[in-house]
Amino acid sequence: MSEINEILKKVTASIEEATGKFNAKAEDALKEAQKVRQAVRRNKGCR
């Protein structure tokens, strides 16, 4: 039973690490999208 618990702990740690990396990339993508939106708004104002 303790072997199963160790495996579950490792799997949980891996999932948490992957989730953290995914969230960081999602944050970066959101920031980039916001920058693009601001640039588009500025360009529309120049017409």
Image: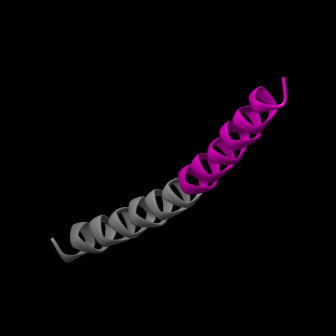
Apparent side of residue 23 relative to residue 40 in the rendered image (left or right): left
* Residue 15: x %, y % from top left: 40, 59
Camera-nearest residue between 43 and 21: 43
- Residue 7 within the segment the image draws in magenta: no
- Residue 46 within the segment the image draws in magenta: yes
Vertical arrangement, residue 5 with respect to residue 18, above or below = below
Vertical arrangement, residue 17 with respect to residue 32, above or below = below
Camera-nearest residue between 27 and 44: 44
Camera-nearest residue between 42 and 28: 42
Vertical arrangement, residue 36 with respect to residue 4, above or below = above
Apparent side of residue 11 relative to residue 30 in the rendered image (left or right): left
Start and end of the magenta stretch? 25-47
Vertical arrangement, residue 40 with respect to residue 33, above or below = above
* Residue 25: x %, y % from top left: 60, 54
Quadrant occupied by the N terminus: bottom left
Quadrant occupied by the C terminus: top right
Name the residue rendered at 45%, 64% in the picture: 14
* Residue 27: x %, y % from top left: 55, 55
Name the residue rendered at 26%, 72% in the picture: 3
Name the residue rendered at 49%, 56% in the picture: 23
Apparent side of residue 11 relative to residue 42 in the rendered image (left or right): left
Apparent side of residue 39 relative to residue 30 in the rendered image (left or right): right
